[in-house]
Image: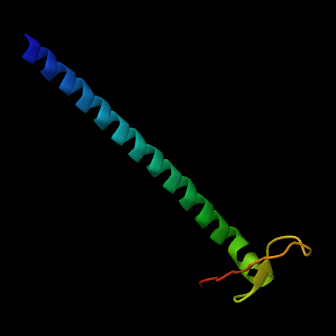
Amino acid sequence: MGKLLLIVLAAIAAFMVLSVVISALHFIFWVAVVALIVVVGLRLTGGARRWRLRYPPGFVIVIGHPRLPAVAPVEIHSHP
């Protein structure tokens, strides 16, 4: 009887783990779908071209306040 109970508990635990994995994969899938829609939308509307024209390759943006020390410049690299 005790062995049967352990087998049932193991089956329930395996089902829960499988359920969590499927849920995580489902979440990642929808994040990828939304990212794809955003990228395609930017390409269709020309948003990426406007970004490239405003900030050409090699453009450097300095993040921070002018009076604060130790501000590292951030380079933006655009790919065609």
Q: Nearer the viewer, residue 68 or 63?
A: 68
Q: Residue at x 80, y 78 (%)?
A: 62
Question: Which residue occupies the foreground of this view, 4 or 58?
Answer: 4
Looking at the image, the residue that sits furthest to the bottom is: 58
Quadrant location, the C terminus: bottom right
Would you identify the image quadrant in which residue 4 lies? top left
- How many numbered discs sit on the rendered protein? 0
**Could you tell me which residue is drawn at 34 percent across and 41 percent down?**
21
Q: Residue at x 8, y 17 (%)?
A: 3
Q: Nearer the viewer, residue 10 or 31?
A: 10
Which corner quadrant of the image does residue 71 belong to? Answer: bottom right
79 vs 9: above or below: below
Tell whether 55 sits left or right of 28.
Answer: right
Horizontal side of 43 relative to 12 (left or right) equals: right
Please name the residue shown 90% across and 75% down the image.
66
Q: Quadrant of the N terminus?
A: top left
Residue 75 lies, in percent from the top left, at: 70, 82
Q: Residue furthest top?
A: 1
> Which of the pair 44/16 is nearer the observer?
16
Q: How is the image coloured?
A: rainbow
Q: Is residue 21 left or right of residue 5?
A: right
Estimate the x, y position of residue 32 in percent, counting from the top left: 50, 56
Q: Position of residue 40 (x, y in %)?
A: 59, 65
* Displayed quadrant of residue 60: bottom right
Can you name the residue that lies furthest to the front here? 69
Compared with 11, 23 (above or below) is below
Q: Position of residue 6 (x, y in %)?
A: 15, 20
